[in-house]
Image (cartoon, rainbow, N blue to C red):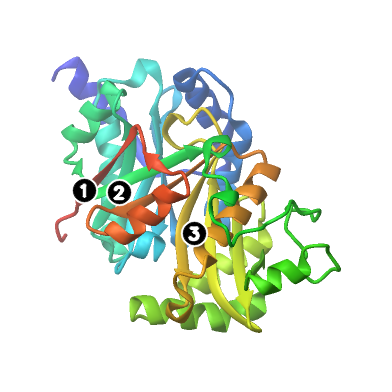
Amino acid sequence: MTTTAVAEQALTIRPLTREDLAAVVAIDAAIEGRWRRNYVERRLAAALREPALHAQFAACDGKGLAGYALARVLEGEFGRTEPGLRLEMMGMRADARGHHGGARLFQALSDWARRHGIRDVRTSASWRDAEMLRWLDSVGFRLAPKFILDTALDEAAPPAADAALTVPAGHGPGNEVNFGANQANDNERLALEQPEVRPMRPEDLREIVRIDHAITGRDRSDYIGARLAEAMGDSPIRVSLAARLDGAIIGFVMARADLGDFGRTEPVAVVDTIGIDPEYEHRNVGRALMAQLFANLGALQVERVETVVASTDAALLGFFQRTGLQPSQRLAFARRLDRA
């Protein structure tokens, strides 16, 4: 038996636990060149809080933790019609590489996905990361028919580009605007039929589900309710906004902070769900939502915003590009899983 085969056989795969935190942080720091304890700790805490939505595995050898893989279930993000698994973080200790530990960790993730009725794994990587691209190819990933769009917040299209948009800086904990207060621009806002944009509330759920159903033709109340609860419980991770006009909810946007997935060097917010009541299209609702989202994210010291759009969705691509998002240096990959 070769030395490589012996080393591969010596690796054991098990679920990642809270006790692995220090070892994961150390391996991650060696790979990324910086310490990201807060990010890793938050990811492990989220997995413990919602185990059905997270798959996390450890590879161990005689020295302890040799590697790890962290993935999250995608339910309705980016207009999905079936659940998927997003591989978000993977690493191997330097002296444990070359023994197929990454492949075995991916196999553990794949087996977990199949047991949970998931047959689609997604991830992303910089086109400059040759080592990661080679590994993705080796385990069967292919380019996905989707575009990743992103922008630095300070380069996003200014709200003034649309004549009907006037969103002042707010003073709440998330920099949100209180349009219920007496403000100098109230009359102008009403005259221009400016929507009120504010943080999403639990009582908004029914109307948001109604709008989403009108757009997608599907009842995604469980998914939207779970993301709303996440926003209420961990606001630094998720920012969710609703737009009101004529006394009703007419649009919404949901974004989450990804503070370190696959070598990001800056905090990034991912816009994963946006919807406008079809009766209020072309009334600046989407632009108002995005402008306030950018303001809230800036207050949270998030530096970049990104989203994923199907290559065939010309309307949504155009909308995001008008708000300043452009093709990213990151590529989208997908791996279809065979049935067990």
For the residue labelled by badge 2, is the local secondary structure a helix, a strand or a loop?
Answer: strand
Q: Quadrant of residue 53?
A: bottom left
> Which is more toward the observer, 182 or 133?
182
Locate residue 148: give its quadrant.
top left
Where residue 218 sits in the image (x, y, percent)?
A: 35, 80
- Whether 177 is drawn above or below 27: the answer is below
What residue do we see at 63% from left, 47% from top? 297
Q: Is residue 220 visible?
A: no
Instruction: Give the labeled residue for mark 3.
Output: 51
Characterize the local packing of mark 1: few (<14), some (14-19) or many (20 or more) Cα atoms within 10 angstroms.
many
Q: Quarter holding the N terminus?
A: top left
Q: Earlier in the sequence, mark 1 or mark 3?
A: 3
Contact check, label 2 and label 1, Cβ < 8 Å: yes
Q: CA distance from mark 1 to mark 3?
A: 22 Å
State how far apart marks 3 and 2 are (Cα).
19 Å
Q: Nearer the viewer, residue 87 or 99?
A: 87
Residue under circle 1?
A: 335
Q: Residue at x 49, y 26 (%)?
A: 28
Q: Kindly report which numbered mark, 1 or 3, lies closer to the viewer in this rendering.
A: 1
**In the rendered structure, which disc, 3 or 2, sits on the residue that comes first in sequence?**
3
Residue hosting label 2: 122
